[in-house]
Amino acid sequence: MPQLRTVLLLLVGFTMAALPLKADEKTEPPVPIRMAPPDVPESFRRSGSSGLVTVKFLVDDKGNVQEPVVVKSTHQELEEPALKAIVKWRFKPAKKDGVAVGVHVTIPIKFANE
């Protein structure tokens, strides 16, 4: 039986809706520096399925994850593990004109069989 492997899709899912950009501003996105993989429920692992949970959250000006919410999900049983993992993540904060700022980020977390 192929083992279930969690693949984290990071850069594709970043959105920075909290930062209105102007031509004279320099903005750097947040960069993940510590990522915790989600625990995969045993029932899901045995099913051989794959799934996707999209999570939106705020990366504050200290690089901590705040206010995570599930935007969409292919399997409800993956939502809680995804949220529990995301709150353990740490980021190098986003910067706007050289100053650390909070930004909203959306990340898809893919659970796939390999």
Image: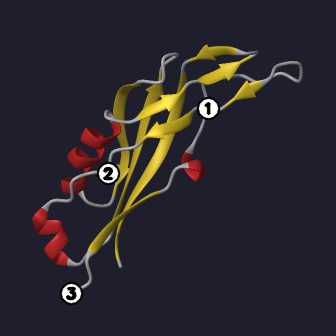
Instruction: Return the residue nearer the eye: 71 or 101.
Output: 101
Where is the N terminus found, in terms of image quarters?
A: bottom left
Percent coordinates x, y for residue 46 in the rendering? 14, 75
Closer-to-camera residue (29/49): 29
Classify mark 3: residues with Cα within 10 Å, few (<14), some (14-19) or many (20+): few
Give the x, y percent position of residue 109. Answer: 40, 54
Q: Residue furthest right?
A: 24
Rendered residue at 57%/42% (across/down): 14
Residue that mark 3 sits on: 1
Circle 1: residue type: Met
Closer to the chain start, of discs 2 and 3, is 3
Q: Which residue is mark 1?
A: 16
Looking at the rendering, which quadrant does residue 70 occupy?
A: top left
**Residue 48 x %, y %:** 23, 78
- Residue 75 is tagged as none
Q: Is 34 above or below relative to 10?
A: above
Callout 3: SS: loop
Rounded to the nearest whole Å, what is the CA distance between mark 2 and mark 1? 23 Å
- Disc 1 is placed on an element classified as loop
Circle 2 is placed at which residue position?
A: 37
Residue occupying the point 49% across, 31% down:
91
